[in-house]
Image (spheres, rainbow, N blue to C red):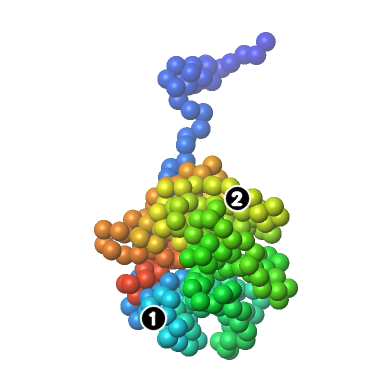
Amino acid sequence: MIKLTTTVLVTAVAMVCCGQPAMAKPRPGKLTKVWESDTTLRTPESVLYDQKENVLYVSNIDGKADELDGSGFISKVSLDGTITNLRWTSGLNAPKGMGIHRNRLYVTDVYRLVAINLENGQAEKTWDATPQAGAFLNDVTVDKDGTVYVSDNRNNKIYRLKDDKWEIWMDGEPLGGPNGLLAVGTDKLLIGSGKRGALQSIDLKTKAITKLADGMAATDGIEPEGKKNYFVSDWNGQVFHVTPDGKAQQVLDTRAEKVNSADIAYVNRQKLLIVPTFFKNKLVAYKWE
């Protein structure tokens, strides 16, 4: 026979009678602003954290998003928001998404992907979309094996650069206007389907598409928060926290202030979410608590 002490028995009865859960539910997270950069950036579209160098790279469109004007550039920014090198590399065409592998920074350049040497900021190689006319390459992600994926959100295409072979890896309406990309391991690719306001997952072996969450409008950046959670930005001025079961919690809304939230970065060690504000020409950093 199992004997219960008075304390345990009372607690058990209270939980049954009063409907009290055995464990408290975790409270929703929140973002608290900690800094803003100055406004010398020029239409910052994407921000990328380089863990090796402990620095942020920022792509600046500086003009129209699809114009071949050569005015785009990449900035380097410290984790306290100081712009340490405004024009680290320049001469680009409306640069947007970025990814790093070894000694290269990969960045989209309207109709092409450009590989930039991280040591000197010089372009080393380019790969063109097919066809060039009408192409609108947007985000970049690199998996653990160094395979590069690039979205063309106007044409429902995803390109792949693998073993120096550049090809259209996937295309079609089911991609839903793919913008943000995030390689998860070497078997899954997350996409922000901007036309559907959804976060979707592609099996890299079968190319099967699964919807993870929706209701997020013009999905842009995707960043891992940990424990299979993700931050997803809506270019219009929202950021969502998405859990593994597909629940999307709005954690930032700057639409009333007409502040956009483009392709975000998350620095896990500092729990710092960095948001490029596009037309406001600055970065804003928030602490995740």
Tell which residue pokes out farthest to the left in this image: 256
Whether 258 is drawn above or below 250: the answer is below
Q: Nearer the viewer, residue 208 or 2?
A: 208
Q: Residue at x 39, y 62 (%)?
A: 235
Say which residue appears at 71% left-offset and 76% top-offset.
164
Q: Residues within 10 Å of mark 2 (few under 14, many from 20)?
A: some
Residue 23 against residue 65 in the figure, above or below: above
Quarter of the image where one finds residue 149: bottom right
Q: Are marks 2 and 1 in contact (CB under 8 Å)?
A: no
In the rendered image, the vertical position of residue 152 relative to residue 95, given as above or below: above
Residue 286 screen position, x and y as percent:
40, 62
Q: Amino acid at mark 2?
A: Ile
Considering only order in the chain, which callout, 1 or 2, is on the residue closer to the N terminus?
1
Q: Horizontal and vertical percent for residue 8?
A: 54, 20
What residue is shown at x 43% (from left), y 71% (from top)?
45
Whole-percent x and y of residue 174? 55, 53
- Can residue 160 be seen? yes
The residue carrying mark 1 is 62
Residue at image location 66% in from the left, 54% down from the top:
207
Using the image as rendered, state which of residue 127 and residue 135 is in the foreground. 135
Q: Position of residue 111 (x, y in %)?
A: 52, 77
Q: Nearer the viewer, mark 2 or mark 1?
A: 2
Residue at mark 2: 209
Q: Furthest-top residue in view?
A: 1
> What crowding class fits label 1: few (fewer than 14 Cα within 10 Å), some (14-19), or many (20 or more)?
many
Q: Amino acid at mark 1?
A: Asp
- Circle 2: element type: strand
- Mark 1 falls on what kind of element? loop
